[in-house]
Image (spheres, helix red, strand yellow):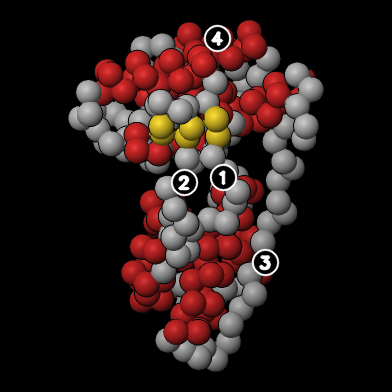
Amino acid sequence: PNRGRAFGYTKEVIPHKRTARNLRYNVASLERWWGDKRVSDVTAINCRAYAATKKSSGALVDLKRLQAAINHWHKEHGPLAFVPKLTMPAAPNPRTRWLIRSEAAKLLNAAHRIEYLKRLILLGLYTGSRPGVLLALKWDQIDLKTGVMIRRPQMTAGASNKQAPPVRLGRKILGHLRRWHRMDGGNCALVIHYNGQQISSPHTSWRKACKAAGLRNVTPHTLRHTRITWLLQKGANL
């Protein structure tokens, strides 16, 4: 947990993870609070004090990352005389929020001037893919002729083991994708982008769109819940 140990984890583990950008954010957050502390300071009291500075979900993710960094250092550079087992906050209740069609229409209308946000919303609603998958989606993962989208190009070392099977695209979203492809003109490999650059997380624009649409407790992952719920309402097999 001190700077040398976090540095080892940052350089030796994170670059090989598919979610490296988010993991670096977790480590930076940890450094601000734990950076001047030692392994002996990783106590239940300090874990709870850190958790009190963030939402429970954010603190849980950060502390899991800290545990992984300590374990990595112990295995690769240790042994440490003492390997603490961190005290974790309780996991939050799973989100069950989903959008009715009128809410989805309001959200799209609020985002109509922000091209990348509009693309994220439509792809989320029509494919049920996770936000992280969509934000990293490249045009070579989409076959515009056959209408098939490969959610992940290949499994690499350290990649998430969450299932992400290919999805057959419906007529409406395929029409949107073909139009977007013409708009991009082959100038960007990414489907969702801002001036050709990848968007790590659309938090600010998302919050503004939700506020304009009058929606509460809605996150980008809500789009996945919404797609699944709509399919079940139509009688799809779970």
- Write down the residue under mark 1: 164
Residue at 47% over, 89% down: 78
- Write down the residue under mark 4: 106
- Circle 1 SS class: loop
**Please, is residue 46 above or below residue 197 in the view?**
below
Q: Earlier in the sequence, mark 1 or mark 2?
A: 2
C-alpha separation, residue under disc 2 versus residue under disc 4:
30 Å
**Please, is residue 88 above or below residue 146 in the view?**
below
Are the residues tagged 3 and 1 within 8 Å (C-beta)?
no
Residue at 50% over, 91% down: 79
Q: Nearer the viewer, mark 3 or mark 2?
A: 2
- Circle 2 SS class: loop
**Please, is residue 163 above or below residue 2 in the view?**
above
Question: Counting other residues with Cα less than 10 Å from the Cα at mark 2, is it few (<14), some (14-19), or many (20 or more)?
Answer: some
Question: Counting other residues with Cα less than 10 Å from the Cα at mark 3, is it few (<14), some (14-19), or many (20 or more)?
Answer: some
Q: Which mark is residue 54?
A: none
Q: Is residue 64 left or right of residue 36?
A: right
Tell me the kind of residue under disc 4: Lys
- Write down the residue under mark 2: 152
Are the residues tagged 4 and 1 within 8 Å (C-beta)?
no
